[in-house]
Amino acid sequence: MGTVPRDEPTRSADQRFTLLVEQCRTDLYRFLLRRSGHPDLAEEVLQESLVRAYRSLDRLPAWSMARPWLFGIARHVLLDELRRQKVRVGPAFEDSLAADPAKSPEQHLEASDWTQHLRSEVAQLEPPKPEILDLFYGGGLGVAEIGRLLNMPEATVKTHLHRARAALRRSLCARMEPGGGS
């Protein structure tokens, strides 16, 4: 996650947009993938979002707000596409375990099991908690930015984050207890 290009008179809007895309593209794709559950759909929505954002550069209030603005556009494009396709949003996370030769197959399996459990628990949280967790941890957006994006007060975003973390903590602790399914 890099810094968003500032309002610099020496850079053109095209140059700033290119830099923004370079800095946000991976996080944006991962966010869309987690929210849609479909790699092809995530890529399609990403492309459409970038086109729409570029065409709407004149509506960007300030370059310091570019990252949440871009996530907001992507979120709306995804929701429109899901409504159009009548696809149910479901979490599908790409496998985050990179091949690590230092880990044994048993360690990979255990890490994968924990990852799947966590993903399952996040998916069971009531809306908008999964999306807020995604934007905060996966998208790198702050509480204020998420609040603006989802049209809710910062305190509400903080409450959802706190409750989501608490629910996940309870679930993970229960799993670690003897007979808890580890």
Image: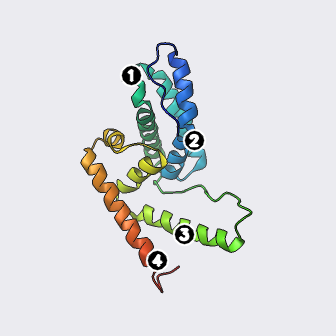
Q: Which residue is mark 3?
A: 114
Q: Which residue is mark 1?
A: 59
Q: Earlier in the sequence, mark 3 or mark 1?
A: 1
Image marks 2 and 4: residues in contact by CB distance under 8 Å:
no
Secondary structure beneath label 3 = helix
Tag count: 4
User: Residue 59: x and y, percent?
Assistant: 38, 22
Q: Residues within 10 Å of mark 4 (few under 14, many from 20)?
A: some
Image marks 2 and 3: residues in contact by CB distance under 8 Å:
no
Q: Residues within 10 Å of mark 1 (few under 14, many from 20)?
A: few
Please give the name of the residue rendered at 26% of the width and 50% of the height, measured from the top-left corner. Answer: 156
Residue 145's tag is none
Residue 63 lies, with reference to residue 161, above or below; the image says above
Q: Amino acid at mark 1?
A: Arg
Q: Which residue is mark 2?
A: 26
Q: CA distance from mark 3 to mark 1?
A: 43 Å
Secondary structure beneath label 1 = helix
Q: Is residue 89 left or right of residue 129?
A: right
Q: Amino acid at mark 2?
A: Thr
Q: Earlier in the sequence, mark 4 or mark 3?
A: 3
Secondary structure beneath label 4 = helix
